[in-house]
Amino acid sequence: MKQKALFFSLALLLLIAVDTRAQKSSTILRAGVNFANVTITNDGDIDKNSVLTSYQVGVMGDFHILSVLSLQTGVLFTGKGSKTESGDPNGNTYNRATSNPWYIEIPLYAVLKSPTGPIKFFAGAGPYIAIGIAGKNKVDGKFLGSSFQSEKDIRWSNDDPSTLDYEEGSGYGIMKRFDYGLNGMLGLQVTKLVVSLNYGLGLAKLQSGSNSSADDQNKHRVLSLIVGLRL
């Protein structure tokens, strides 16, 4: 819980520190493809899960601090999750499940940029916080030769992030509503066009009622290819 408090406090302090009166600032409209997965072992292994392809859209503000340094923050609508599969599709017992939660995410990056020119390279990193708002859990397969299929809305806990010692509305089969972690990105800017690769490292466990600092199981991992337009 101390880790959660640290990330929320850091994000708030850095957002306050952004100087909107700086010499240069701009808005970036961005959209991209997400290749999402979820860790399944204490060491953060995801090999037994399959990548879920999703997408993200949003708007970011780029606030100039120094000639080669800026802060970026904004609001994103982004999909995460993973796919799992067990058994033989041609056999009598087979199971396939897809979990696709959707979040409103607020990232914050410190971004280093190459000197002025028609083409700029940049790299950035920073924390993010997110709240789950929608999503589906889908299951289909066969059990002893009989087919089954199910699709349900994701159930979210009613956790208030200000209560750091317990989680409201927790229970079996319920996902934590609040997520947080770290983002890193690499990219280039050609005039107003921005192209980047982003990697999101989730630090909060997904299942309700669990201790996020215990191990690396059940945490989001998202690789994104992003295209943006500077206004």
Image: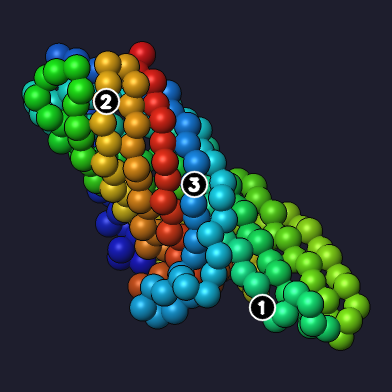
Q: Residue at x 30, y 63 (%)?
A: 3
Q: Earlier in the sequence, mark 2 or mark 1?
A: 1
Q: Residues within 10 Å of mark 1 (few under 14, many from 20)?
A: few
> What is the C-alpha distance between the residues marked 2 and 1?
43 Å
> What is the C-alpha distance between the residues marked 2 and 3?
20 Å
Q: Is residue 174 above or below residue 41?
A: above
Q: Is residue 195 left or right of residue 157?
A: left
Q: Earlier in the sequence, mark 3 or mark 1?
A: 3
Q: Residue at x 49, y 65 (%)?
A: 38
Q: What's under tag 3, amino acid-wise?
A: Asn
Question: Which of the pair 143/129 is nearer the observer?
Answer: 143
Q: What's under tag 2, amino acid-wise?
A: Gln
* Residue that carries the numbered disc 3 in the rendered image: 34
Q: What's under tag 1, amino acid-wise?
A: Ser
Q: Secondary structure at mark 3?
A: strand
* Residue that carries the numbered disc 2 in the rendered image: 189
* Residue that carries the numbered disc 1 in the rendered image: 86
